Amino acid sequence: MPRLLVTGGAGFIGSNFAHYVINNSDYDVIVVDKLTYAGNRASLADLPEDRLTFVRGDIADARLIDDLVGNVDIVVHYAAESHNDNSLDDPRPFLHTNLVGTFALLEAVRKYGKRLHHISTDEVYGDLAFDDPNRFTEATPYNPSSPYSSTKAGSDLLVRAWVRSFGVAATISNCSNNYGPYQHVEKFIPRQITNVLRGLRPRLYGEGRNVRDWIHADDHSSAVMTIIEKGRIGETYLIGADGEKDNKTVVELILTLMGRPPDAYDHVADRPGHDLRYAIDSTKLRTELGWRPSFSNFEHGLAATIEWYRKNEAWWAPAKGATEAFYARLGQ
Ligand code: NAD
Ligand code: DAU
């Protein structure tokens, strides 16, 4: 069977991707993950051992990565420091993993002539005004705002340079905000759901007018599989599901779905440099490769996600205390 190396496969989107691949294809999956605070081995616990191999390690460890890449067919690179608020508190790990780690992977796929798909974010394009009629496309100039998004932008540029200079067979995708199971409680939607489950009030940064373009993690996975199978080498594809919502609307919906008054939340200190709005135009992926999202109803996807957190307190509870202590220090 062909073998996929999934970096960061114990994180939110990587673990959803490992489930998606094993349930929908013949690929065997090898996950390499450092198990930082964001990684959780339990997110892969229900996957069959004959299809999934787990290796704990750092993607910046060139010797380890050389060994792993030499023994697989395709590398799908999810591993990253991924949280903006953390990058504002301490940018250093973002440079290590997102830049040095990506460099180590690129050198290994170059040496062995392996196919790479690099996972990136819409945040590399900066933000849009609320009333801008345009959305991000593959032609939008890079303009990242935070230490997180600037290191992701840097990693994309490294991939592009290795394609052009060394002929590495890579594709890149830039996706919008994901939601679904296995997302760390530091992120917006799981934080608010688990606050309500704990009897705490949701916390909205600033006025809550900022807009994010939500996509279910399974739709992100199906898009990545489509690009791996049909994408043109050297190309970038934007992934999005037309899910623009402002944060206030999302918090109110979570409260309503959980049977609470929609105004039972607190406004807290805003994020410094907070990007106003992200919005993806995924026409290229849809027309060239024929991809379509299957979660067309955000409210249904959110209700299923709430149910998942209700049933899986053992998965999220160990991280909740430290996460809220971090936010308390920031006044959030
Ligand atoms: P996450 O923080 O939940 O998971 C990241 C995983 O990478 C963790 O399991 C962590 O242990 C691992 N990791 C971190 N540093 C590592 C290192 N040096 N070596 C090996 N493993 C390491 O992140 P996520 O939300 O699942 O994001 C995954 C990828 O998708 C990232 O590249 C991110 O930029 C991108 N992305 C995320 C979103 C989103 O909405 N969350 C949207 C678009 C793109
Ligand atoms: O757009 C893709 C990006 O989406 C990914 O590249 C990142 O890895 C991912 O973390 C996410 O970035 P955001 O910064 O948009 O996500 P976050 O969940 O941190 O916040 C979403 C919005 O909610 C943002 O406008 C900030 C706001 N927020 C967040 C938290 C944690 C709140 O209002 N309250 C909160 O408690």
Image (cartoon, rainbow, N blue to C red):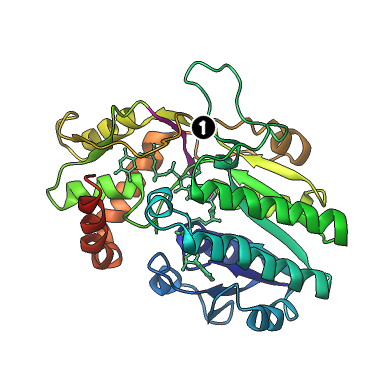
Is 179 within the magenta?
A: no
Task: Decide if residue 8 is on the left or right side of residue 323.
Answer: right
Q: In what element is the residue under mark 1?
A: loop
- Front position in the image: 231 or 177: 177
Regarding residue 79, the answer to whether it shows in the image is no
Regarding residue 238, the answer to whether it shows in the image is yes
> Which residues are the magenta region?
210-218
Is 211 within the magenta?
A: yes
Residue at image point 48% right, 59% down: 81
| Amino acid type at mark 1 | Tyr
Residue 165: x and y, percent?
86, 57
Image position of 57 with respect to 269: above or below:
below
Residue at image point 71% right, 76% down: 69
Image quarter in which the C terminus is found: top left
Q: Does the residue tagged 1 have its C-beta within 8 Å of any atom of ligand 2?
A: yes
Residue at image point 31% right, 55% down: 185
Image position of 48 with respect to 285: above or below:
below
The residue labelled by disc 1 is 278
Residue furthest left in the image? 199
